[in-house]
Image: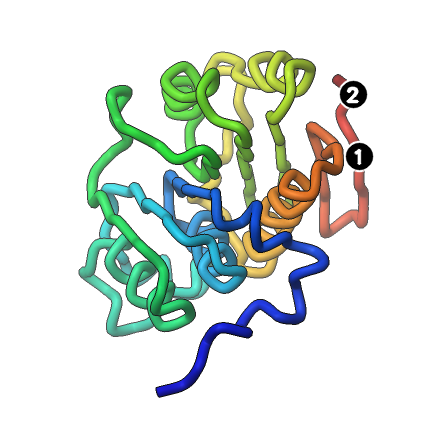
Amino acid sequence: MVDLSNRDMRQRDIIPPERLAEVRASVIGVGSVGRQVALQLAAVGVPTMTLIDPDVVAVENLAPQGFFADDVGRPKVHAVADLCHRSNPQLELYTEARRFRRSDTVGNCVFCCVDSIATRRLIWQAVGDRVAFFADGRMTAEVLRVIVASDPDSRRHYVSTLFDATEAHQGACTSKSTIFCSNICAGLMVGAFAKHLRGIPNDPDLHINLLANEWSLGAV
């Protein structure tokens, strides 16, 4: 049997093992962005993770979300869980093939990867005041936004982003999607998580337009 005790040796100065050991991560939505977030969290070595998503893998999910052909028809949480366990067999992993419920118990670090403002608002109202770190990834086509709430100022800012659904961009994030944009979005979310573990302040609101090569930071 392979000794996995040093699997994190090259990241220990970046992701402190003692802080990582305290993490209980919840990934809500495991489609375009959430699948990539879950795989990265498994790889870095979070000890406990819960995946929540009601959807099954469809053919149109293969190119933009990275699922495999033999995943079609399977619950997304089960397909993602299998890969997470291959990456990190020691991971304690729970799956919920259903929608998020206000009564759900979540971990101390939540990654919100859903596709509607109404659902984001529901999740934040349910867990926002009882998690240490909250990251919201939003993506459509080649444009992404990562919003992090982990201190009083950034929490207040996050609430301001939960505008009414009628004000949202009319193209749903599921209508145009690219795997390269979702990977970048997920990487930025996990990168913010790593900074949080080290006690480094995060930018609360980051917008990136990959097509135009435009980056902007939202002020708190």
Closer-to-camera residue (155/170)? 155
Give the residue displayed 41% in from the left and 14% down from the top.
125
Mark 2 → mark 1, Cα distance in angstroms: 10 Å
Sort mark 2 into few (<14), some (14-19) or many (20+) by Cα contacts within 10 Å: few
Report which residue position mark 1 lands on.
Answer: 216
The image position of residue 179, as x and y in percent, is 53, 59
| 183 vs 26: above or below | below
Q: Secondary structure at mark 1?
A: strand
Residue at point 62%, 12% (across, down): 156
Q: Amino acid at mark 2?
A: Ala
User: Disc number at residue 64?
Assistant: none
Q: Nearer the viewer, residue 103 or 140?
A: 103
Q: Name the foreground residue: 151 vs 73.
A: 151
Q: Residues within 10 Å of mark 1 (few under 14, many from 20)?
A: few
Q: Is residue 3 left or right of residue 216?
A: left
Q: Position of residue 102 (x, y in %)?
A: 28, 20
Rendered location of residue 69, percent (x, y): 29, 73
Question: Does dot 2 land on a helix, a strand or a loop?
Answer: loop
Q: Residue at x 78, y 31 (%)?
A: 217
For mark 2, what is the residue? 219
Q: Is residue 110 above or below residue 149?
A: below
Locate the N terminus by quadrant.
bottom left
Say if residue 172 shows up in the picture: no
Front-most of residues 106 and 205: 106
Question: In the orientation shown, which residue stands out farthest toward the bottom?
Answer: 1
Is residue 93 shown above or below 119? below
